[in-house]
Amino acid sequence: MLNFIWSFMIMAGVIYGGVQGSQMIGLVADGALDSAKEAIELCITMLGVVGMWNGLMNIAKESGLIEKWTKGIDPFLTFLFPSIPKGHPVRLDIATNMIANVLGLGWAATPAGIKAIKGLAELNQGDKKVATNEMCTFLVINISSLQLIPVNIIAYRSQYGSSDPTGIIGPALLATLMTTLIAILLCKVICYKKITK
């Protein structure tokens, strides 16, 4: 559906530019070329950011730092996911995903998130086509994504010439803290209602 919408918008812009005359079609062509150049420059900048943070996450994982942090947040994981057995490997994947998100490394969090969902699916004892409470809770918390350092937004702001790229840290921390707390509260209320039915 999105492909159809984008195709329609591009064609409509080109046709409108053509109807308006050669000067307008020139502006449309210039806009398309400028946008393509800007997209490539942004991709190169973000590739560097992603490579650096993914590398740091891999170093943290290989050095055992993620495992230590997982033990530190184990009571929190037990509160969020009470039916996951202690010591189960999926707890490490969930913790890795959450730690990467808290550090603002959304792209580094994705592989751990995929492994966590697969692990949670394997623990599903019921209908395999229905997500478990733990799967839904993990997904909602992952989407709300508490971030101490919003690395991606800082990189975007820097790329586009912001005089204070890190000025977003305070508001982003407050916003993501509130969304995460509300997400946890809603998940707990809904899970409790499902259990008591």
Image: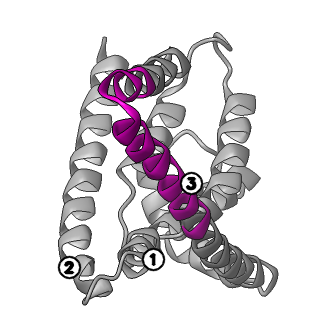
Q: Position of residue 71 (x, y in %)?
A: 59, 74
- Our reading of the magenta stretch's main secondary structure is helix
Instruction: Based on the picture, tell me whether residue 138 belongs to the magenta stretch.
Output: no
Q: CA distance from mark 3 to mark 1?
A: 19 Å
Q: Residues within 10 Å of mark 3 (few under 14, many from 20)?
A: few
Looking at the rendering, in which quadrant would you find the C terminus?
top left
Left/right placement of residue 72 relative to residue 53 reads left
Residue bearing mark 3:
36
Residue bearing mark 2:
170
Name the kind of residue labelled 3 in the image: Ala
Name the residue nearer the viewer: 1 or 27. Answer: 27
User: Which of the two discs, 3 and 1, sits closer to the camera?
Assistant: 3
Q: Quadrant of residue 25?
A: top left
Q: Quadrant of residue 68?
A: bottom right
Name the kind of residue labelled 1 in the image: Ala
Q: Return the mark for residue 78.
A: none
Using the image, determine if residue 39 lies above or below residue 64: above
User: Which of the two discs, 2 and 3, sits closer to the camera?
Assistant: 3
Q: Position of residue 46 (x, y in %)?
A: 58, 70
Please state the extent of the stretch shown in magenta in the rendering.
14-41
The residue that appears at 55% across and 39% down in the rendered structure is: 83
Q: Is residue 111 visible?
A: yes
Residue bearing mark 1:
155
Q: Residues within 10 Å of mark 2 (few under 14, many from 20)?
A: few
Q: CA distance from mark 2 to mark 3?
A: 32 Å
The residue that appears at 64% across and 65% down in the rendered structure is: 108
Callout 1 secondary element: helix
